[in-house]
Amino acid sequence: MIRIFAATFALVFLSLPAQAFETSATAAYVIDQTTGTVLLAKNADEPLPPASMSKLMTLYMAFEAIERGKSNGGLDLTEKLPVSQHAMSYGGSTMFLDTTDRVTVEDLLRGIIVLSGNDACAVIAEALSPDGTEPGFARLMTRRAQQLGMTSSTFANANGWPAAGQRMSMRDLGLLAMHLITDYPQYYPMFAQREFVFDGRAPQNKSNRNPLLGLGIGADGLKTGHTEEAGYGLVGSAKQGDRRVIFVISGLESTAARAQESEAIVNWAFRQFSQRSMGAAGTQIAQAPVAIGSASTVGMELADDLSVLVPVSGDSDVIAEVVYTGPLRAPIAKGDPVGELVLTRGDLPEVRAPLVASDAVAPGGFFVKITAAAQYLLTRLNEGPEEAS
């Protein structure tokens, strides 16, 4: 394995590790979605009571069902669903539904997102459950979460009502938020809705509990949560310019503490880090030697556009290395993988970007092969009997 230090990159990108954020949350996870850089992870993989933040999983599965369509066992936004006695029996945050109601799927979605309706979640769950029950839907939620890579999540219900086995990690919630934003951008604007008055009911429960909406910091989602066991939490996201930050916090002591901590995290994530381009796809980074080829070297270029997150101030270099196993052997086709560019940025996770051949290199002809063989024999002779063995 050959490692080559790329000094030109280190000279251009100078920075220090940003001051670590000291969160008062019991558990937290912050990721720059644009570059995939994890900025903060505190107890991020510990399964914890998610409270209403678990409603995001119900919403994700509802969006999947809408895209699938009613004719394929899914849902339609204009479809009206019945309200069962079980759904109506939920307390806490509700839409104040009763068994005489038939509610459109779109109203139920807004009731979940804006009003945190426990009853609305149960209505969706029973409609999509394999056996028509909320526990049946919860088992489906657990299986789907595993398929999405959420390995620390299990569900007992659709709304986060306190129950044994209702657990999610902060990392899983962050991953779920990314899926909601990237997989269903057509529905994501619902998360920024600040008020929803359903059928003139319960005017005291018409406002979105997300404390960041309307602050002018780019916040546009996603879901608050609170139970006595879980404390106050928030799955939040904000976009400023081309960057989006997703964060998850849990275990705060009050709504005020949740609001203060959430805003502080967003400000820290955008002010202490900046996104920088390291080059567009096709930018040549280095040359690698080629064995027995029509050319003695081949260019190594970025396979894709590469931008990374770096701290905005500091005294520590961003170190760039080219890593490959060499010499490379011909034939080499243009675009073949030939190595990696590895970036180290202080306390931030390293970045590894694929490098590909910038040109094709054909196998060498007869004289190239003879020359290579002669050089090999000469090297062996010069090593002597002991070294050669």
Image (cartoon, rainbow, N blue to C red):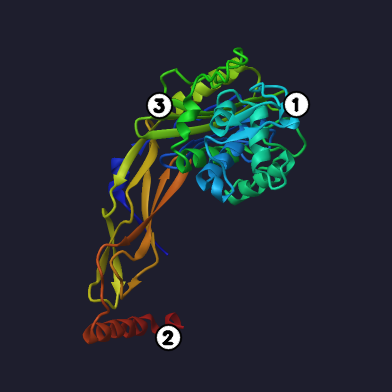
Quadrant position of residue 314: top left
Q: Residues within 10 Å of mark 3 (few under 14, many from 20)?
A: few
The amino acid type, in three-letter code, at marker 2 is: Pro
Residue highlighted by disc 2? 385
Q: Nearer the viewer, residue 362 or 323?
A: 362
Q: How far is mark 2 from mark 1, CA to CA? A: 88 Å
- In primary-sequence order, the first of circles 1 and 3 is 1
Q: Nearer the viewer, residue 233 or 88?
A: 88
Q: Find residue 235 and report its horizontal and vertical position in percent.
A: 56, 30
Q: How many marks?
A: 3
Residue highlighted by disc 1? 89
Asked which secondary structure carries label 3, the reply is: helix
**Image position of 204 with respect to 54: above or below:** above
**Image position of 233 with respect to 354: above or below:** above
Q: How far is mark 1 from mark 3, CA to CA? A: 46 Å
Residue 26 visible in the current orientation: no
Q: Residues within 10 Å of mark 2 (few under 14, many from 20)?
A: few
**Image position of 61 with respect to 207: above or below:** below
Quadrant position of residue 10: top left
Residue name at image x 32 percent, y 52 percent: 6
Asked which secondary structure carries label 2, the reply is: helix
Q: Nearer the viewer, residue 185 or 35?
A: 185
322 left or right of 59 in image: left
Circle nearer the viewer, 2 or 3? 3
The amino acid type, in three-letter code, at marker 3 is: Arg
- In primary-sequence order, the first of circles 2 and 3 is 3
Q: Mark 2 and mark 1 in contact? Answer it, CB < 8 Å.
A: no
Q: Find residue 197 and report its horizontal and vertical position in percent.
A: 55, 18
Quarter that holds the N terminus: bottom left
Residue highlighted by disc 3? 271
Asked which secondary structure carries label 1, the reply is: loop
The amino acid type, in three-letter code, at marker 1 is: Ser
